[in-house]
Image: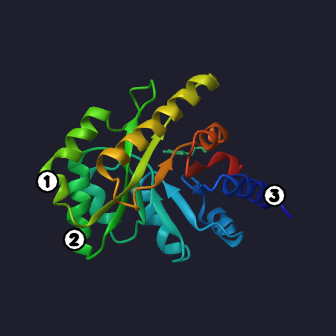
Amino acid sequence: MNEQAAVFNALNAEISDRNARLVAVSKTQSVEKIQALFDLGQRVFGENRVQELLAKQPLLPVEIEWHLIGHLQSNKVKFIAPIVSLIQSVDSFKLLQEVDNQAVRCGRVIDCLLQFHVAEEETKFGFSEKAAREMLTNPEFSSLQNVRICGIMGMATFTENQSQVRLEFRRLRQIFEQTKADFFSDNPSFRELSMGMSGDYKIALEEGATMVRIGGLLFK
Ligand SMILES: *Cc1c(COP(=O)(O)O)cnc(C)c1O
């Protein structure tokens, strides 16, 4: 077994032991490397750029579930609407409305996660709790028929400080639970908590992640 296979199998066992799922973050990786991971059994891949996703997707198996995990501009939604299986990075009402529009045009329902900002860095995108509440209580939100909100996504601060990372993941978990209780209590689709990357996925799993997004560790 080669090294990638060993890393993949061990990671998969660790993640599925926690009843979570692995999103293989394939940004900057070649089509060949993605195909190799597909051949080992991985089906869910995450890309953070629209252009890169559009370039790779036609060259790879149709069985792949593509997740968009990076900041998405409204004017680019139309390009990915036919092919994306989950948009993890919905960070504004305007963007969600455009996803709904484009989903209508494609005759499909697009699954989405709401991205929340809990990290210290201002560079990271995402809703504040206040902004999310404003959207979720807006009657226009309830009128969106072609998006399905499946949970939330977030990122911790990039720091060596493990206890800070843990507190931020715990905060995301609280936001997930509160949002579910207040707005999605009768909606079984709202169940995903996407958090954790190569450097902090173990903490994320301990704090209740249902999906971890791992790139570097898998492709090194
Ligand atoms: C790149 C990226 C990841 C994966 O990061 P690694 O450190 O390579 O595991 C996860 N989530 C998002 C949003 C990313 O952009």
Q: Quadrant of ligand 1?
A: top right
| Image x and y of residue 5, in percent | 78, 61
Q: Is mark 1 within 8 Å of ligand 1?
A: no
Residue type, label 3: Ala
The residue pinned by badge 2 equals 104
Residues at marks 1 and 2, CA–CA distance in whole angstroms: 16 Å
The residue pinned by badge 3 equals 6
Above or below residue 89? Residue 186 is below
Closer-to-camera residue (169/110) = 169
* Mark with earlier residue (1, 2): 2
* Mark with earlier residue (3, 2): 3
Residue type, label 2: Val
Above or below residue 47? Residue 103 is below
Provide the secondary structure element on which disc 2 rests.
helix
Which residue shows up at 44% across the image and 25% down it? 121
Task: Determine the residue located farthest toward the left in the rendered image.
Answer: 139
The residue pinned by badge 1 equals 140
Q: Residues within 10 Å of mark 2 (few under 14, many from 20)?
A: some
Location of the N terminus by quadrant is bottom right
* Residue 156 visible in the displayed image: no
Provide the secondary structure element on which disc 1 rests.
helix
Q: Quadrant of residue 129?
A: top left
Which residue shows up at 21% across the image and 73% down it? 105
